[in-house]
Amino acid sequence: MTQEELDLLKKEFQTQIDGLKSKSVEKSEIESLETKYAEMLAKTEKAATTEEVEKLTTEITTLKEAAHQLNEKFEKRIPQKNEKKMSLKSAISELVGGDDFKEQIRKNRKTSFDLDVKTGDFVQKIDSADFDGDEYRSQLKPGITFSKLTENTIAPIFNMVTVPAGKDRIVWLEGSATVNVGYVEEGSAATSDSEGSTTLKARNLAKISAKMPFTTEALDMPESFASRMQRRMVEATNVWLDNQMINGAGDDSTDPGKIYGLISKGATAFSAPSDLDFTNANIDDLIDACMVQASPYKPTHCIMNLKSRVKYSRVKDSTGQYVIREVNGLLMLGGLQLVVSEGMSDGELLVVDRSTLEFWVKQGMRMIVTQMDGTDISEDKWKAILFWRGQTLVETPQIVGNIYVSDIDTALAAIETVTG
């Protein structure tokens, strides 16, 4: 092909592009054609042989034809001058009363088929199913709504510790020491020696799992149903784990593979301190009593469920101020940050020193999606399987810094009647 012929081809292509720009053609379609055209021209200029030039010229010709066909498609949507205009309603009435419509009914004997309706302004494709049926009049709301889960409020209190690769147990040392300090005469030795010892402690990591089977067809459901169900499984597992950090049944002798809950393995039962006497004791006074019992530890948080929080939020102190109030966006009670957790039962209270709480985690949550479980392949199913390994830890000497009140009302009665 000569240079003159190539120039003419370029001019014809540009004419087709200009024609498209004058019509209601999507801008992205035009830009796509122009981009491909520019790429081919660039290759033509670099072509080293006649064969390469001819091949690229053929591709440009094909591109020009594509633009031409797109022009013709939109030309058909422009009304002819001598074409009678009518409303869409009139066009539909004319169509339904015509012989062609009746013939389609007779031949197809079905409730849905396509026919062209001409109104003069454009050719409208009408599906007979558009006239009836709720599905065609409905708009799908984005997303999938599940029931509301409770918030994870306990895990954020704990201090996170990462278990390194190759390790699956927690080992620590607990020490005890007796230091005898006293006065001595000049040139004399202390009469009592100081002494100390250590004990090696260990705890296994807990392992939890959840699995969710789903069919291959579920992958084609709207709004990524399968992936959203998997995400829901992770969220629900976090809620379950948050509850276990309070109520877990982990025990060195009976259940070493479970989470060690705060109530049973991380706190000391409340015991009214001696020589404290509160008149008309309220929940604020109980927090003070717990802090006295926890000394020398300094509690930072108190934990109760929502029902208890609502019940005691009506209580006022001797100055008329509510004992539960919001400070800088945080709920405070007795100088401690109040945490609401549905892992607590009605009437229970935990007062904890955050520095004593450790949450050991190995790798975090791990999700596996597989088709290799049982008869999954033959049944064309998949399984999403979740694994997590970790453990809580409050060392034995630190348990006294966390106080568990099993019944708030009983504890209030106890601190009001204590006389020493």
Image (spheres, rainbow, N blue to C red):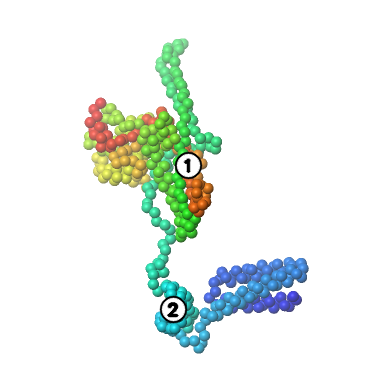
In percent of the image, x 56 and y 69: which residue is there?
Answer: 28
Q: Which residue is mark 2?
A: 106
In percent of the image, x 40 and y 67: which residue is there?
Answer: 135
Q: Are marks 1 and 2 in contact (CB under 8 Å)?
A: no
Q: Is residue 113 visible?
A: yes
Q: In the image as oriented, which residue stretches furthest toward the right?
A: 49
Q: Amino acid at mark 2?
A: Arg
Q: Amino acid at mark 1?
A: Trp
In the figure, residue 239 lies in which quadrant?
A: top left
Pinpoint residue 310: horizontal percent, then vertical percent.
Answer: 29, 46
User: Upstream in the sequence, badge 1 or badge 2?
Assistant: 2
Pinpoint residue 122: horizontal percent, then vertical percent.
Answer: 49, 80
Residue at mark 1 to residue at mark 2: CA–CA distance: 63 Å
Mark 1 falls on what kind of element? strand
If the image is split into quadrants, where does the C terminus sit? top left
In percent of the image, x 52 and y 51: which residue is there?
Answer: 377
In percent of the image, x 27 and y 43: which residue is there?
Answer: 312
Q: Is residue 363 above or below residue 11?
A: above
Disc 1 crowd rating (10 Å Cα; few below 14, some 14-19, many 20+) is: some
